[in-house]
Image (cartoon, rainbow, N blue to C red):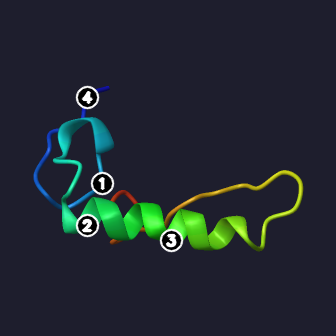
Amino acid sequence: MTLEYTGERVIPDRMDSMNGLLLEHISRYHFALLYMNGRVLDFASGAGVAVN
């Protein structure tokens, strides 16, 4: 499945490396690294796409 890049979501391979949204996304993971221990399940609720 290939997602179209619309600017709504973070798709690192399709974004400029200096894109503000991408940089914010990456910084959140770097912050979370300080609190992780062992295995982590990461799932996003996003804007509710495909929730229903």
- Closer mark to the observer between disc 3 and disc 4: 3
Please name the residue shown 84% across and 51% down the image. Answer: 39
The image position of residue 47, as x and y in percent, is 33, 72
Circle 2: element type: helix
Q: Which of the marked residues, 1 or 3, is nearer the chain's N terminus?
A: 1
The image position of residue 35, as x and y in percent, is 77, 73
Circle 1: element type: loop
Q: Nearer the viewer, residue 41 or 26?
A: 26
Circle 4: element type: loop
Q: Which residue is mark 1?
A: 10
Q: Residues at badges 3 and 2 in contact (C-beta under 8 Å)?
A: no
- Closer mark to the observer between disc 4 and disc 2: 2
Q: Which residue is mark 4?
A: 2
Amino acid type at mark 3 = Arg
Q: Nearer the viewer, residue 18 or 38?
A: 18
Q: Which of the marked residues, 4 or 2, is nearer the chain's N terminus?
A: 4
Q: Residues at badges 1 and 4 in contact (C-beta under 8 Å)?
A: no
- Disc 3 from disc 4: Cα separation: 25 Å
Q: Which of the marked residues, 2 or 1, is nearer the chain's N terminus?
A: 1
Q: Nearer the viewer, residue 32 or 5?
A: 32
Amino acid type at mark 2 = Leu
Q: Which of the marked residues, 3 or 4, is nearer the chain's N terminus?
A: 4
- Specify few, some or many for label 1: CA neighbours under 10 Å numbering under 14, 14-19, or 20 or more: some
Give left or right: position of 25 versus 43. left
Q: Which residue is mark 3?
A: 28
